[in-house]
Amino acid sequence: MELGANGAAPAAGDLIKEGSELTFMEDVIEASKETPIVVDFWAPWCGPCRSLGPALEAEIQAAGGKVRMVKINVDENQQIAAQLRVQSIPTVYAFHDGKPVDGFMGAQPPSKLKEFIGKLIDMAGGDGGLEEAVKAAEEMLAEGAAVDAVETFAAILQEDPDNAPAYAGLVRAHLALDEADKAKELLKAAPEAIRDAPEIAAIQAQIDLAEAAAEAGPIPELRARLETDPDDHQARFDLATALAATGDTAAAVDELLELLRRDREWNDGAARDQLFKIFDSLKPDDPVALRGRRKLSSMLFA
């Protein structure tokens, strides 16, 4: 068990705290860069929450400071629950290194909770240098050494086939080499354990946006169409898609929000669906995603 500065075990209050939308970045995103954070989305009226909460807290305390917990009352924090797509409660997410890495919905038996917390402890306790290897491969890719990145990501996956960051990196490296077919094959063959991982969802969304952008048309022409007719919804949708594919996600989100403001139900809510695809292509704590989700929530629930 991890000991505090005075040699004593951490107090329960240090391990488990009530969170809110205002403190989420500090309590969860930033804090998870030091220690894995379990986020329990609950409500006072939820029966299963009353059994899951104490059982989960017991496992957190048993971990002795290796994992911490933040409880979010969804009745009082509806916006953050919507941003993280909490569909029902109880819902539990685990954050590590600033991003969601695992989660589940509904009450779970003690054995599953112990396994859930154990995986987080293992994740935080070291991985034989694989995390550093992933960072090194990402640097190779950023510097244009895509072939070296492919080799490094592949070597990491030989050690850990379920390493979602490495798998997503391998897909992106093949895209950088203009091997789109190979990238798509890899995505289809992703191990079941990581198919729903945020990194895999992000690269799939990026590919979908890029393919849609190829059909959207040149950005200058789309802007010209909108200047002529601001209610040309297809032109605005295509412009947003093209902007997202070029990396200007902030402008893309703004265009889609404007489309929603003008006609929320256009094309069966296509603008809303495209917004979610852009959000999925970004990291959960990306400022563009956080700002866009807030604006979308206020627009839909106003």
Image (spheres, rainbow, N blue to C red):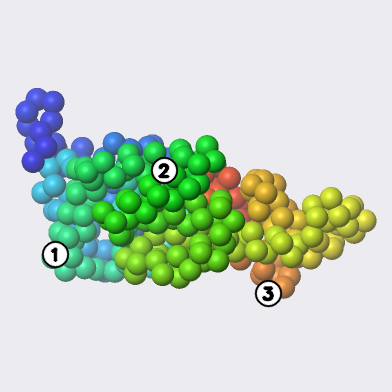
Q: Position of residue 87 (x, y in %)?
A: 43, 67
Is disc 2 surrounded by few (<14), some (14 to 19) or many (20+) residues within 10 Å?
many
Q: Are marks 1 and 3 in contact (CB under 8 Å)?
A: no
- Check disc 2 and give the amino acid type: Ala
Q: CA distance from mark 3 to mark 2?
A: 41 Å
Can I make out residue 37 in this image? yes
**Residue 202: percent from the left, percent from the top?**
50, 56
Mark 1 vs mark 2, foreground winner is 2
- In the drawing, does residue 90 fall left or right of residue 114? right
Q: Quadrant of the C terminus?
A: bottom right
Which residue sits furthest right?
Answer: 228
Residue at 44%, 51% in the rendered image: 150
Residue 285 makes an appearance in the image: no
Which circle marks residue 137 in the picture? 2
Q: Which residue is mark 1?
A: 110
Of pointers 3 and 2, the one earlier in the residue sequence: 2
Which corner quadrant of the image does residue 40 belong to?
bottom left
At label 1, the amino acid type is Pro
Q: Quadrant of the N terminus?
A: top left
60 relative to 241 in the view: left or right? left
User: Disc number at residue 62?
Assistant: none
Residue 115, image x, y percentages? 17, 60
| Marked residue nearer the N-terminal end (1 or 3) | 1
Label 2 near label 3: C-beta < 8 Å? no
